[in-house]
Image: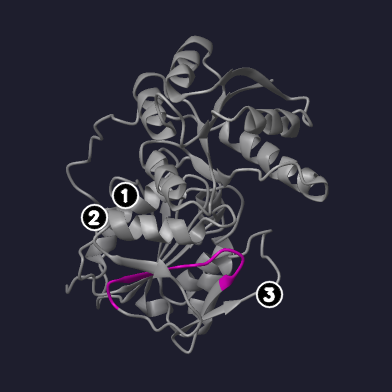
Amino acid sequence: MINVLIADDSELMRTVLRDLLARDDEIQIVAEARDGQTAVDLVKRLQPDLVIMDVLMPIMNGLDATCEIMADCPTPILILSANTDSGDNLCAFSAIRLGALDVMEKPAGLVTEAFSEIAEQLIRKVKSLCRIKVIHHFRTSKRPAAVNLITTVHPRRLLAIGASTGGPQAVLHLLRELPQHLPASVLLVQHIARGFASGFAGWLNRETPLRVQLARDGDTLLPGRVLVAPNDLHLAIVGQKVVLTETPPVHNCRPAVDVLFQSLADDGLAKDTVALLLTGMGQDGAKGLGQLRRKGALTLAQDEESSAIFGMPRVAIDQGAVSQVVSLADLPAVVKAQFEKQ
């Protein structure tokens, strides 16, 4: 049985969430909180498997509650946010920075025709996140004395990143450590809830030294700029320019990491590319990563210990698509080394 705590100041929203989750017999609501402080107290006492957390609440908001929970009683947290509200959106991604695992749009009432789809999405999210073993978010990471760096004959000029569950934290950690004038273009496909890609890009732009924006059709590859795949559109590179398409999902994902990686291989850019596959469920990215490696790209995968979910990286490693497996702590140094003159 999966024990879930709901924290939301709206009685209507708590009722909606109860009704949605009641569709699965493996999930039970063990408690509800109307404010962040009550949520913190209940988590310490009941130790639920997952917390569904609103961001804007009285007494203590979801951001501060996430901070308290991750400091005192680390628990998987799913943030609910109204993706059309910029303040809600900013708090949601700030909560992810503090240890929450994922963000999802608040159900907008009980629309009969959409009820089943919303319930399915929420239940799937709850079941995947509750299995993740979270750790004290304010621990001090111990870094190895030396990092095993792969060197290249000439500096590369493209960094392609694919990530899913747990990815926002990992991506933030990496991009924060890269220089403002990185001599490479960065392309990012992050599986994220519908409506949140724009907020995700804006959050990264505020939190990192790089210029981060949603990719647009026809964009060129510029050094020091990060292009994030929009919701519901595949991001590919054709003729060294961005092409956004509504072609069918790949691995049930749109955007899909494999579409980006395969396009770089097909466009003759493999030898200029460092391709990185981060934490996430499923197998998206493994096939494209293999194609890039065979054509001369440096291909990296996040290691199991530092991954929230070691799904996508594991598949890529098992398929022989990975040049080097790297811990999250070491990724910035490994990546930076590929864009420096040897």
- Depth check: 283 or 97 in front? 97
**For mark 3, what is the residue?**
247
x and y percentages locating residue 268 in the rendered image: 46, 85
Left or right of 183: which side holds 65?
right
- Amino acid under label 3? Thr
Q: Earlier in the sequence, mark 2 or mark 3?
A: 2
Query: Is residue 153 rendered to the left or right of residue 197?
Result: left
Instruction: Check if residue 35 falls in the magenta segment.
Output: no
As measured in the structure, the alpha-carbon distance from the residue carrying label 1 to the one carrying label 2 is 7 Å
Asked whether 101 or 268 is in front, the reply is 101
Question: Is label 2 in a helix, a strand or a loop?
Answer: helix
The spot of residue 199 in percent (x, y) is 45, 57
Residue assigned mark 1: 173
Residue at figure coordinates x 48%, y 24% from the top left: 35
Q: Which residue is mark 2?
A: 177
* Tag 3 secondary structure: loop
Q: Nearer the viewer, residue 320 or 33?
A: 33
Which percent across, then down, holds residue 213?
39, 68
Amino acid beneath label 1: His
Labelled pair 1, 2 in contact (Cβ < 8 Å):
yes
Q: Which residues are magenta?
A: 223-234
Residue 187, placed above or below residue 149:
below
Task: State the scheme by which the image is colored.
Answer: one colour
Marks 1/3 in contact by CB < 8 Å: the verdict is no
x, y percent for residue 294: 48, 73
Which disc number belongs to residue 41?
Answer: none
